[in-house]
Amino acid sequence: MKALVLSSLSGIQALSIKEWPEPVAKPGETLVRVTAAGLNFADIMTTKGGYPGMPAPPVVVGREFSGAEESTGRRLMGYAQWGAFAESTCAYSNMLWPVPDEWSNEQAAAFPVNYFTAYLGYWQAGMTNPAPAGRTHRVLIHAVAGGVGTAAVQIGRLLGVDMYGTSSSDEKLARVKELGLQHGINYKRHDYEESVKNLTRGEGVDAVFEMLGGEHTAKSLRCLRDFGKVIQYGTASGMQPKLDVRALYAKSASVQGLWLTYLSQKSEIIVPAWEHLSKWIKGGKLTPQIGQVFEFEQAIEAYKLLEEGKNYGKLILKIA
Ligand SMILES: NC(=O)c1ccc[n+]([C@@H]2O[C@H](COP(=O)([O-])OP(=O)(O)OC[C@H]3O[C@@H](n4cnc5c(N)ncnc54)[C@H](OP(=O)(O)O)[C@@H]3O)[C@@H](O)[C@H]2O)c1
């Protein structure tokens, strides 16, 4: 079969499409013929050895896909840690979900990582429950026009959350506003800390979905209101999160990690999350946002676009 193989941990140039042996399903796994796959920021980190748990190269990369179950032809979308950017993949059967009839293969491949991560962000922030009487939950979403960001906006709208979102581009912000983002902040032209302060009359937000790291962790903490939470789920800047712990005391605030790789192993968390998400899907209320679809042979171009932060929503690879 054809597969996208990483031959060393030296970055995107170490990727190439190669002939690779077909995988064989072990107990608890399902063999899927892959039709489309979703590119994640984690895939960029993986090429430089920056993602924990990966086997040593050469390895077939890719963590998210849609396709057909080999034995039944049933349409499935799935989440894996590697092996998804190939004509066939074996995934844990409990990490596969049915594709809604009205979704294309590309939309299905854009669902698992973005929507579970965004949903769990709200869940960890306590926002899947209604806000106390007379209050509205408020969230600041970084990279709001990205894959996780656009999913967070659709879910936040359904939860009735007041959303503040950052992006480098007015054009991207205009598209996310159509999804329900109320307050777009172009961080190239405005300091987001100042903007949040002004827009919330100095009160701040209840949670920040923070995936930049470096000084943005401390800065996001300063955007919180009392008892607020920074949900730290990435370090796209490549910098370790910086944090002044004394700033936590001042507001009884907290910083909490979120890692889908870890949480996805916990059925008591993932099963209810899927139940909630699938109710919205059945109601036609979630639509995965696809920025661009690339032929499999153009995979490196897609990686470069995501690495440069030029994407809107999800970048998809067409596998078959
Ligand atoms: N912990 C988890 O389980 C988990 C799960 C999924 C994703 N993540 C993390 O969430 C983040 C978003 O992932 P994604 O796949 O949805 O990507 P994405 O948001 O679709 O793409 C990255 C976006 O981040 C913004 N950005 C800001 N600074 C950047 C930088 N230094 N380099 C590149 N992009 C930058 C860019 O948007 P603007 O130009 O609009 O700023 C870019 O479009 C990543 O950090 C990823 O590792 C974590």
Image: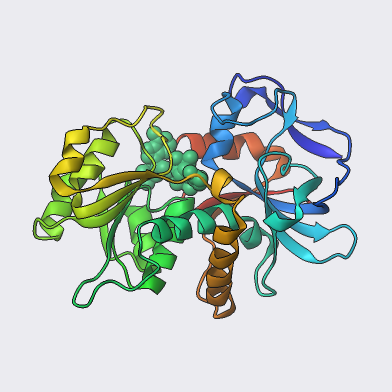
- The residue at 86%/41% (across/down) is 23
All told, the count of numbered labels is 0
Q: Which colour scheme is used?
A: rainbow
- Residue 203 is left or right of residue 266, and the answer is left
Q: Can residue 311 be seen in this view?
A: no
Residue 165, percent from left and from top: 30, 54
- Residue 315 lies, in percent from the top left, at 57, 48
Residue 317 location (% of width, % of height) = 66, 47
Q: Which of 140 and 122 is in front in this view?
A: 122
Location of residue 35 by image quarter: bottom right
Instruction: Decide if residue 194 is in sight here.
Output: yes
Question: Residue drawn at (18%, 77%), measured in percent from left and top?
Answer: 134
- Single out the residue that lies furthest toward the bottom: 283
Specify whether 32 is left or right of 148.
right
Give x and y (percent) for residue 17. Answer: 76, 32
> Is residue 14 positioned above or below 27 on the image?
above
Q: Which of 296 and 162 is in front in this view?
A: 162
- Give the left or right position of residue 240, taking residue 55 as reference: left
Q: Decide if residue 187 is on the left or right side of residue 114.
A: left
Quarter of the image where one finds residue 179: bottom left
Ligand 1 lies in which image quarter? top left
Q: In which quarter of the image is the N terminus?
A: top right
Q: Where 191 sits versus 239, above or below?
A: below
Residue at the spot x=50%, y=75% of the render? 285
* Image point (58%, 44%), residue name: 261
Residue 9 vertical position relative to residue 28 in the rendered view, above or below: above
